[in-house]
Image (spheres, rainbow, N blue to C red):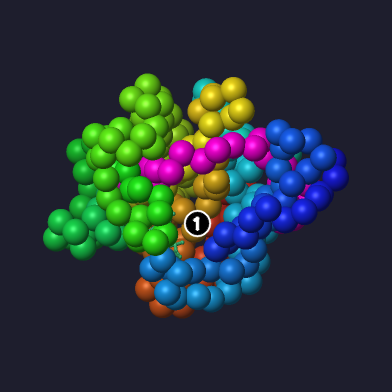
Amino acid sequence: MQKLEQLYEGKAKKVFATDDPELLIVDYKDDATAFNGLKKGTILGKGAINNRMSNFLMTLLEKEGVPTHFVKELSDRETLVKKVQIVPLEVIIRNIAAGSFTKRYGVAEGTVFDAPTIEFSYKNDDLGDPLINTYHALAMHLASIEEIELIESYAFRVNDALRAFWAKRGVTLVDFKLEFGRLSDGTIVLADEISPDTCRLWDSATGKKLDKDRFRQDLGGVEEAYSEIMHRLDEND
Ligand code: TMP
Ligand code: ASP
C-alpha cells in the first residue's frame, strides 16, 4: 500500500491518499486542542496511544456487530482505513453527568443516569458544533431518518460493549463522542477514533480522570494519564 499526497490535516490527525481510491491512511499527531481550537498544546506520545487504542476498540466493536472504517494498523501512528464521507453529526452518549451536560443543565458532575442519554451536535467548527435534534438534522439533510436510527442503535451498542470492557479494567466509561461515515455504496460505518481524546474515562476506585479532561482543565499529569489508560487496556481480563 503506497502512501500518497496529504488530503487533509485536522486538529489531531492527518489523512493521506493511497493507491487504492477506497482506502486512506490516517496519521495520528501529538497535538491537542480544546474549546474549538482556542487552547492548543502537545501531549507527548498521544498519537501512538490513540492509534493503538482506537484500532483495538474498533476491532472489538466489529465482533459486536458494529461495522467500522478500520482496515489495518500500519505503524505506531498510521492506520489504513476505508474512505468514508463523514456524516456531519457528533454522536454523544453519556452514562454519567460531566462536561457540557453539567454546564448546560446545572447537574452535578458525577450524577449517574438511570439510562444512557444520546445527543447530536452539528459538526461545524465555524458554528462551534451546536447541539441539534433529529428534526434539525433531517431539515438540513445531514442524514436520512433510516441512517439516524441505525447510527443511534450502533451508538448504544458501542456503549454496552465499551462500558463492559472498561469495567473489567477498573475504569468507568462516563461519556464519549462517535462519528459515522458512508462508504461509497452508502453503508454506514463507525469512523474517526475512540480514544482518551473522545471519551471520558474515570478510575472506578478513585474517580481519577484518565482522559483529555486533564488537558482541558489543566489538571496536570496528562501524559501519565494517557499511558495509565493504555496500560489498563493492555491488561488481561
Ligand atoms: P462534552 O461534555 O464537552 O459535550 O463532551 C462529551 C464527550 O465528547 C466527551 O467524552 C468528550 C467528547 N468530545 C469530543 O470528542 N470532541 C469534542 O470536540 C468535544 C467538545 C467533546
Ligand atoms: N477537539 C476539540 C477542539 O479543539 C474539543 C475537545 O476535545 O474538547 O476543539
The picture places residue 66, in percent across and down from the top left corner, at 51, 27
Q: Which secondary structure class fits the magenta region best?
A: strand
Residue corresponding to mark 1: 196
Few, some or many residues within 10 Å of mark 1 (<14, 14–19, 20+): many
Which residue is at the front of the view, 32 or 46?
32
Q: Is residue 223 above or below residue 59?
A: below
Q: Residue at x 58, y 74 (%)?
A: 42
Q: Is residue 68 visible?
A: yes
Q: Is residue 229 magenta?
A: no
* The N terminus, quarter of image: top right
Q: Is residue 71 visible?
A: no
Horizontally, residue 201 falls left or right of residue 62, namely left
Rendered-image quarter of ligand 2 = bottom left
Q: Residue at x 55, y 63 (%)?
A: 11
Which residue is at the front of the view, 142 or 63?
142
Horizontally, residue 119 falls left or right of residue 158, namely left
Horizontally, residue 68 falls left or right of residue 17, namely left
Which residue is at the front of the view, 102 or 85?
85
The picture places residue 218, in percent across and down from the top left corner, at 41, 77
- Residue occupying the far front of the picture: 140
Amino acid tagged 1 = Pro
Which residue is at the front of the view, 25 or 49?
25
| Residues rendered magenta in the picture | 74-94
The picture places residue 141, in percent across and down from the top left corner, at 36, 34
Q: Is residue 176 above or below residue 63?
A: below
Q: Residue at x 61, y 63 (%)?
A: 46
Q: Residue at x 57, y 33 (%)?
A: 68
* The C terminus, quarter of image: top right
- Residue occupying the far right of the picture: 2
- Find residue 50 and report its image quarter: bottom right
Q: Is residue 83 magenta?
A: yes
